[in-house]
Amino acid sequence: MTKPPKAQAPHDRLAAYLDADMSAVNALIRARMASEHAPRIPEVTAHLIEAGGKRIRPMLVLAASHLCKYEGEFHHHLAATVEFIHTATLLHDDVVDESKQRRGRATANLLWDNKSSVLVGDYLFARAFQLMVDCGSLRVLDILANASATIAEGEVLQLTTAQNIETTEDQYLRVIRGKTAALFSAATEAGAVLAGAAEEHVKALFTYGDALGVSFQIVDDYLDYGGAGADIGKNIGDDFREGKVTLPVIRAIAQAESDERAFWQRVIAAGKQGEGDFEHAQALMAKHGTLESTRQEALAWADRAKDALAPLPDHPLREMLSDLADYVVARLY
């Protein structure tokens, strides 16, 4: 895979193509995050939603529905739904992870408190389900309800794998498919179903969203060790400090010599970290090439996403979705 040209980011081309739709989605989001009796709800929600996120997930809904020739208005509801689900999970994640930074800004739980973050997240989940029902499709409701359950399951599974240096790559894949890829694939699949697309096209768009989401998360996990804070909107090394067992760690442990395994046992399993440990972890990854192999894994999943689009009809949006897969991995270069 060659590095995408920097002149015009694929995300920007997609955003420009969907500009009118995204304006409608943003208006719907602002209307539905309002609360007559609890002003803290829009305060907390706006802090995160208006923090400059790329809105990839709602744009996936819109792109899939347009690619499948949808002509109604409920794709706006679905796009707002996935953004609310995503925002709710971020609010909850920051409480669980005790995070202090999100998208380059202080987290809501730091500015307000944990209770506000959890309860506002719950409110957004409820709003998401109201928006799903508006669409009037039981199959769409089933897709997004299942995705919500899968996301929660993935987060719980991540808790059980944290600090467990015996975690396998298969377990890691289940975690990231749950916590990240599930909403990507639900967005693309639901957009196609709403449009009444042929099953071949529904399956293709589900597969695309799944592979794109897996690649997206592997990139984030790579950057926690091999990037810069500006790349991921949080402090570099957060995953290491939280004892998260991500793909670079799993592959470093798999190739570790006895003294190296003792290091991983101390810093990850026992959580006893000191000055210089993060840098030593990076050095071990460099020694065994695990950052490069993780990078290649992310690129391979991006290629799978692009290949999945083959059955879909020729359309500018198909090309844009293919380019979006390149955009997701562009931070690896």
Image: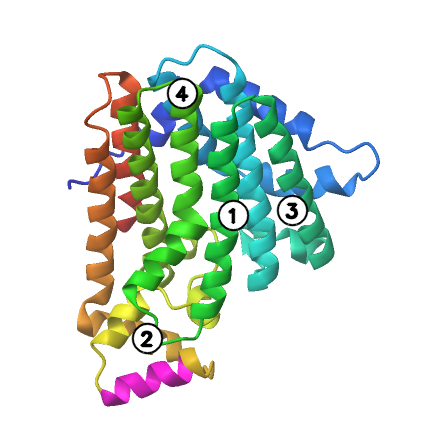
State how far apart marks 4 and 2 are (Cα). Answer: 44 Å
Q: Main secondary structure of the magenta part?
A: helix
Q: Nearer the viewer, mark 4 or mark 2?
A: 4
The magenta stretch is 258-267
Q: What x and y, as percent, mark residue 200? A: 26, 26
Q: Residue at x 32, y 75 (%)?
A: 281
Seen as rendered, the residue at the extreme front is 138
The scheme the figure's colours follow is rainbow
Above-or-below relation of 154 to 301: below
Q: Secondary structure at mark 4?
A: helix
Could you tell me if the residues under marks 2 and 1 are in contact, i.e. CB atoms within 8 Å? no
State how far apart marks 1 and 4 are (Cα). Answer: 23 Å
Closer to the N terminus: mark 3 or mark 2? 3
Q: Is residue 71 visible?
A: yes
Does residue 190 appear to the left or right of 37 in the view shown? left
Q: Nearer the viewer, mark 1 or mark 4?
A: 1
Mark 3 residue crowding within 10 angstroms, few (<14) / some (14–19) / many (20+): many
Please give the label number shown on residue 149: 1
Q: Residue at x 52, y 48 (%)?
A: 149
Mark 2 residue crowding within 10 angstroms, few (<14) / some (14–19) / many (20+): many
Q: Which residue in the protein does label 3 denote? A: 121
Q: Which residue in the protein does label 4 denote? A: 65
Mark 4 residue crowding within 10 angstroms, few (<14) / some (14–19) / many (20+): many
State how far apart marks 3 and 2 are (Cα). Answer: 34 Å
Q: What x and y, as percent, mark residue 311? A: 20, 25
Closer to the N terminus: mark 1 or mark 4? 4
Q: Is residue 235 inside the magenta stretch?
A: no
The amino acid beneath tag 1 is Ala
State how far apart marks 2 and 1 are (Cα). Answer: 34 Å
Q: What x and y, as percent, mark residue 82? A: 51, 35
Above-or-below relation of 111 to 160: above
Above-or-below relation of 21 to 253: above
